[in-house]
Image: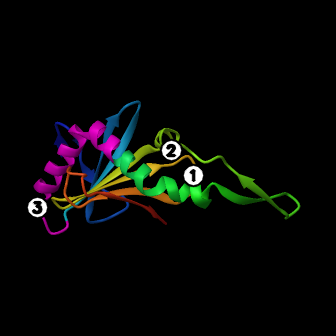
């Protein structure tokens, strides 16, 4: 099906009970994954369209939540790690601690999951800050991110 905001909505190739759409955002595309979660598909699509039309504001709010919830975690130890050398030995690496602005700027919105008529999850690429773990922001109140929370996943 074709949607005026989300474009083509098609069955998801990865999940049999979900749909996907791709939306242009800044100079790239962002994948939307839509899961009905016992709600009519129309309600999930309506929430996804609302998210898409407010993406710039929501992206900013979500990044600010990541900064508030996870920057301290990064600066308290994730910025230090060991790298295996060619000879099998370990070399300790200590990256600088990041300011709020530096941390914020590392975050790049990658995809958005919309579940039912209230759950929105933003997934971020983090430039390797958390060694391949996904940085996610969850809102259980739709586009109201006032109680959203950030966490590491995977």
Please report the residue visible at 29 percent of the width from the left and 57 percent of the height from the top: 148
Between disc 1 and disc 3, whose residue precedes?
3
Q: Mark 2 points at which residue?
A: 103
- Cα distance in 3D space between marks 1 and 3: 38 Å
Distance CA(mark 2)–CA(mark 3): 38 Å
Give the residue number, with chain letter if any, for mark 3. Answer: 40
Instruction: Report crowding for label 3: few under 14, some 14 to 19, many 20 or more residues within 10 A (C-alpha).
Output: few
**Chief secondary structure of the magenta span?**
helix
* Image-based side of 47 in relation to 135, left or right: left
Measuring from the top left, give residue 114's x and y in whole percent: 25, 56
Whether residue 59 is in magenta: the answer is yes
Which mark lies nearer to you, 1 or 3?
1
Rendered residue at 25%/52% (across/down):
145
Q: Give the residue at mark 1.
A: 129
Given the current orientation, which residue lies at the most extreme bottom position? 38
Is residue 131 located in the magenta-colored stretch of the structure? no
Residue at image position (47%, 56%) is 70
Q: Do the residues labelled 2 and 1 touch (CB within 8 Å)?
A: yes
| Image depth: mark 2 or mark 1 in front | 2
């Amino acid at each position: 099906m074709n949607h005026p905001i989300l474009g083509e909505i098609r069955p998801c190739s990865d999940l049999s009970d979900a749909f996907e759409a791709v939306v242009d955002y800044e100079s790239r595309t962002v994948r939307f994954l839509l899961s009905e979660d016992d709600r009519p598909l129309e309600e999930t699509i309506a929430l996804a369209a609302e998210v898409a039309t407010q993406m710039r504001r929501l992206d900013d709010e979500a990044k600010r939540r990541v900064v508030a919830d996870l920057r301290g975690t990064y600066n308290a130890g994730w910025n230090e790690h060991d790298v295996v050398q060619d000879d099998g030995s370990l070399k300790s690496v200590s990256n600088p601690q990041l300011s709020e602005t530096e941390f914020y700027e590392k975050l790049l919105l990658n995809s958005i999951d919309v579940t039912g008529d209230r759950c929105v999850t933003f997934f971020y690429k983090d430039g390797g800050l958390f060694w391949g773990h996904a940085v996610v922001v969850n809102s259980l109140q739709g586009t109201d991110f006032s109680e959203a929370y950030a966490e590491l996943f995977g």
